[in-house]
Image (cartoon, grey):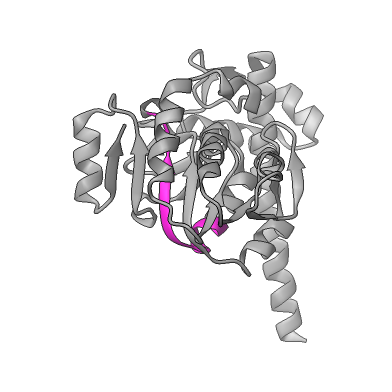
Amino acid sequence: MQRKAAASAAQTKKHGQMLIDERRQHILSLIHLHGRAVVGELSRTLHISQITIRKDLDYLQSKGLIQRTHGGALRLQSGAMFDPSLQEKQKQHFQEKQRIAAAAAKMVQEGECVMLDSGTTTTAIAQALKGFSQLTIITNAMNIAADLAGTDFEVILIGGSLRKNSFSLVGPLAEDVLEEMHADILFLGVDGFDSEIGLTTPNFLESRVNRAMVKASRRVVAVCDSTKFNRRSLSRIVPVSAIHCVITDTDLPSAIAEGLLNQNVEVVLV
């Protein structure tokens, strides 16, 4: 009975933490949608005390995601940590993504198992991999799986709940499936790359799936253009020490590149 009670308490704590993350993600989305939020309105809408709302806003400000004001919060004018749609991201840094994709393909060998997370850079990598004849592709991105459906690759699309913003599958089912998988190499796209905090993404469910992908892969390669560096998003995926290599463009400041090399991370500039 004691073991059951302890397990139940642990499960409740786990779900409680997820609810906190979900609430903060929802608050952040509302602030980005309306440009501002008022403590009293959030309290009434979410049926949460104003003290808790203030703590949530303080937390979001500590992560550099919002600007706290008296009685509420404002959206950051830069919008750097907003969670744009896949279609919006496709218009950004197109040439850099193509060069990153070409460099990523050179790291793959025929017959290997390649894991791709969702995103426009990894979508470009999927296109670049079509020059191979025998690969196994594991992905949580529905658009990537559909794009590779006409190849001779073995394509494994993990299950989960659909995030319409990114066409990705997330949630406990996705995480459970990844525990049974092993890939030779993972190409991981990120929204923020901070040398101290690590790799981050705006959505905490996405971060949990990405973390499971890292655990399931022998080699982890972060793929992102140089504008993603020195940026922090809501949810940390892994620390810098968890990756082996990063592929980015030549606009990366030399100080950041040197810092990564000092942390034993290979840096490929394209």
Task: Residue at 28%, 50% (x, y): give it.
Answer: 265
Question: Residue pushed farthest bottom?
Answer: 1
- Is any atom of residue 172 visible in this view? yes
Please provide percent x and percent y for residue 139: 63, 50
**In which quarter of the view is residue 15 placed?**
bottom right
Task: Residue at 67%, 30% (x, y): give it.
Answer: 27
Identify which residue, 36 or 168, lies in the foreground: 168
Please provide percent x and percent y for residue 86: 63, 28
Please provide percent x and percent y for residue 188: 49, 45
Measured along the vertical axis of the image, is residue 237 above or below residue 46?
A: below
**In which quarter of the view is residue 109 placed?**
bottom left
Task: Residue at 57%, 23% (x, y): give it.
Answer: 90
Please provide percent x and percent y for residue 88: 61, 20
Query: The N terminus is located in which quarter?
Result: bottom right
Measured along the vertical axis of the image, is residue 12 above or below residue 234?
A: below
Q: Is residue 221 magenta?
A: yes
Identify which residue, 166 or 43, lies in the foreground: 166
Q: Tell me the magenta residue range.
A: 212-225
- Is any atom of residue 93 visible in this view? no
Q: Is residue 103 magenta?
A: no
Q: Using residue 4 as the reference point, say whether residue 208 is left or right of it.
A: left
Q: Using residue 13 as the reference point, say whether residue 106 is left or right of it.
A: left
Identify which residue, 266 or 173, lies in the foreground: 266
